[in-house]
Image: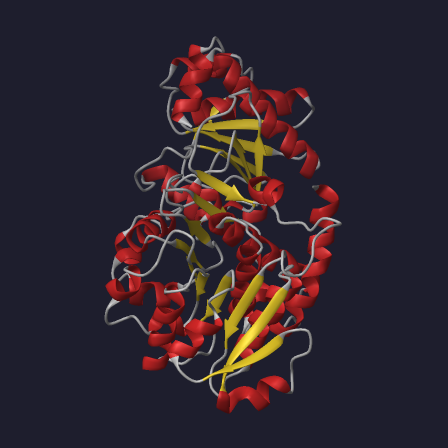
Amino acid sequence: MAAADRAAIEGGTPGEALMERAGAAVADAVCARFRPQPAAVLCGPGNNGGDGYVVARLLKQRGWPVEVRALAEPATADARAAAARWDGDVRPLDGEAPAGLIIDALFGAGLARPLDGVAAAVAQRVARPEKVVAVDTPSGLPGDTGDPKGPVFHAALTVTFHARKPAHVLEPGRSLCGEVVVADIGLGETASRLVENGPDLWLERFPWPTAASHKHERGRLIVVSGGAWSTGAARLAARAGLRIGAGLVTVLSPTEALASNAAHLEAVMLRPFETDLELEQAAADVDAAVIGPAAGVDESTLLNVLALARTGAALVLDADAITVFRDDPEELFSVLDRDDVLTPHPGEFERLFPGLLKGAPERITAARAAAQKAGAVVLLKGADTVIAAPDGRAAVNVNGSPWLATAGSGDVLAGFIGGLVSQGMESFEAACAGAWIHAEAAELFGPGLISEDLPGLAPGVLRRLYDER
């Protein structure tokens, strides 16, 4: 954002003009969501406060009863100019939370210290977050981490500019921001290796079939089953891979689990194996392989992962296929390449990358470091799922669904990613697309979702994407 601001100003756009545009965007968002009512605009000393003076002036012009409460005198030239155009009273912020609608323009995303003094007191006394609108970020929320270290405002609506910041997409900041509106204030394009995950990122390269496509061209995916009493997870992954478009999906099953798998499979094929050598031979001609769902944390799973790594298949490693390397992560990293995908939840992430998540300022930094260390794509699961590639690219999923908190949903995600990779989609983009489709499918169903529902919900999401391509 600092680079974007500088580029716009150096290109001839005055800072005052950018402030006017920002304030107008906030006023428009407020008027679109709230009826006219008494509003208090809390203005800090910096440019965030300057935006607040613009908001106050524009709301007053539209007939709103508005007051400004200032934490301190404006300290920048642009903020002083905006304050000079405000024709109403300015009262000092006294530590009490105003009644009515609160426009929080105290501090923006650049704040790097905890709130203190009067600002902290107000943040702690706001009783109704549904009556708070934040300018850029809720005050007290660091824009680069989303992790407040002291009192923080909780907003129902946050209006930010140009692009979301990490604070808008990483928990707990994401929940503190409420609805996030991203306003275009004319800053132009800026280069970034951190993006918001969504169809704009990967839809142009989605592997749709053509009239001439046949099943062998649409990707050959295998999923490795667990033992006789642990077969359901692999079937979930296999069905997900088939639903996402893979042309041929096969469950490779230990002999003792063949009967269980055969009783539940139809379009998904089934093939036995006994040893890691047999698994390697069975996977010799496939495009992608999923291993880990209910595979078992034992030596056979470790050997099976190493066997698959000797083939040309791109690997999607989940659950037990991650945990089994907890005593020697380097053994796994030594056989991975940039086309492979790891899909750990935080506990599994800690087993492969001990101390990395806790020691990082936020999840994006941790996932990027893990991807570089592993030499593979890392998808760190959570309400704020982060996907990172070894080359430094990273995306944050912003459509996470609470309905995914159910057993087996991660197995389906692994299958979605494996199915897309098998069709030739680049692994980072496949992981991003799989995570986004996974969450959209969950939202289609909503309350009562179980993991078995998810593969059958994917076609509805795919139809929408196909129509939008």
| Quadrant position of the C terminus in the picture | top right
Residue drawn where x is 39% and y is 82% of the image = 275
Q: Quadrant of residue 46?
A: top left
Residue 160 drawn above or below residue 400:
above
Residue drawn where x is 47% and y is 49% of the image = 428
Q: Quadrant of residue 156?
A: top right
For the question of whether residue 128 can be seen, the reply is: no
Residue drawn where x is 47% and y is 86% of the image = 227
Residue 6 drawn above or below residue 321:
above
Q: Position of residue 447 (x, y in %)?
A: 66, 68
Q: Position of residue 263 (x, y in %)?
A: 65, 87
- Figure label count: 0
Left or right: where 367 falls relative to 272: left
| Quadrant position of the N terminus in the picture | top left
For the question of whether residue 290 can be seen, the reply is: yes
Nearer-the-camera pick, 405 or 220: 220
Q: Position of residue 351 (x, y in %)?
A: 30, 67
Nearer-the-camera pick, 391 or 350: 391
Left or right: where 11 falls relative to 72: right
Residue 69 drawn above or below residue 416:
above
Considering every residue shown, the one lying at the far top of the view is 12
Q: Position of residue 448 (x, y in %)?
A: 66, 72
Residue 408 drawn above or below residue 18:
below
Nearer-the-camera pick, 267 or 184: 267
Colouring scheme applied when the structure was drawn:
secondary structure
Nearer-the-camera pick, 160 or 98: 160
Left or right: where 61 falls relative to 342: right
